[in-house]
Amino acid sequence: MKSAKVLHNPTAGEGEHTKKKLISMLETAGYTCSYSSTKEDGWQKIKSDTDFIVAAGGDGTIRRLAEELLDKRILDKKYPIGLLPFGTANNIARTLGLPDNIDDILEHWKEENIMHVDVGKIHDLKKTEFFLEGFGFGVFPELMITMKKRDHEEDTPEKELVKALQLIEEIVWSFPAVHCVITLDGVEHTGNFLLCEIMNTRSVGPNLVLAPEADPSDGEFEVVLIEESQREVLASYVQNKLAGNEPHTSFAITRARKITVRQEGTVFHSDDELIKTEPGQAIDIELLPGVIDFLV
């Protein structure tokens, strides 16, 4: 019988998945498990006889766990991660192709199919950063800043996504394009961009699918550059999302492993974290291939 360490964000989504319910589901599926809430101290401790880690939460929960693994604080051995997506956007779970039904996810774990997922390493900051989903500047950091200022009023995940889409539509129409020089595997691209996203997942933010063919295990990033001239096209895409459609994106994508970004602005995002830099500061990004294992 496989032994799992459950790392749970009890506030993810609507907080409907309790400790008792999680343990019951895993035991019914045939696993023994220990439990830690990521809201409590000491959640990073993993017993040596653990076979895999269960990350029960959203994209932010997975990022916190990945940070621990990458820092080798709990990495006595390489633990596969089984993901139970209880968050709002769940961009990582969607990219991994996980089923919507939790019972189906638990059943697939028994097949022990592992995806070796790449990670982006960010240099030249005060502390070294990384990303699992994406890194970039433009309308997404602006959305994050706006969302932090508003009262969430106990919104459901569905309402939260709709509100984020409404806000980003407003931002797209008003956001001043940022001049940037970005070098992708030695090839320089210059322009005024509404959005620059170096993506490891297919979607970012409120499930905007900007890189539908992205594979986080293929050893390449998908780089999406949306210029000022494409403002109307980006706004139209968001409007379609609000209408409940998933239109095909027509934004150009360039694949790369080593990237240097230099923009006139000072704000970037790394997954769901905001980063402040000096104006015009060059930031180097490299791909670390297959460093985190996920059960898929």
Image (spheres, rainbow, N blue to C red):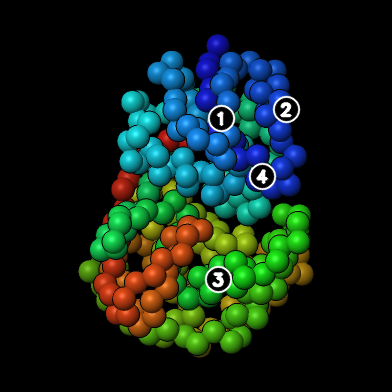
Bin the neighbour count of mark 3 within 10 Å (Cα to Cα): few under 14, some 14-19, many 20 and up. Answer: few
Question: Image point 63% across, 32% down: which residue?
Answer: 105
Question: Does residue 254 sit above or below 104 in this rendering?
Answer: below
- The numbered mark, 4 or 2, whose residue comes first in the sequence reads 4
Residue corresponding to mark 1 = 36
The CA distance from mark 2 to mark 1 is 14 Å
Q: Determine the secondary structure under disc 3.
A: helix
Q: Is residue 69 left or right of residue 111?
A: left
Bin the neighbour count of mark 4 within 10 Å (Cα to Cα): few under 14, some 14-19, many 20 and up. Answer: some
Residue corresponding to mark 3 = 145
- The numbered mark, 2 or 1, whose residue comes first in the sequence reads 2
Q: Which mark is residue 21?
A: 2
- The numbered mark, 4 or 1, whose residue comes first in the sequence reads 4
Bin the neighbour count of mark 2 within 10 Å (Cα to Cα): few under 14, some 14-19, many 20 and up. Answer: few
Q: Determine the secondary structure under disc 2.
A: helix
Residue 246 position, x and y percent, is 68, 64
Residue 25 position, x and y percent, is 70, 24
Q: Amino acid at mark 4?
A: Thr
Question: Does residue 170 sit above or below 130 in this rendering?
Answer: below
Residue corresponding to mark 4 = 11
Q: Amino acid at mark 2?
A: Lys
Q: Amino acid at mark 3?
A: Ile
* Quadrant of image for the N terminus: top right
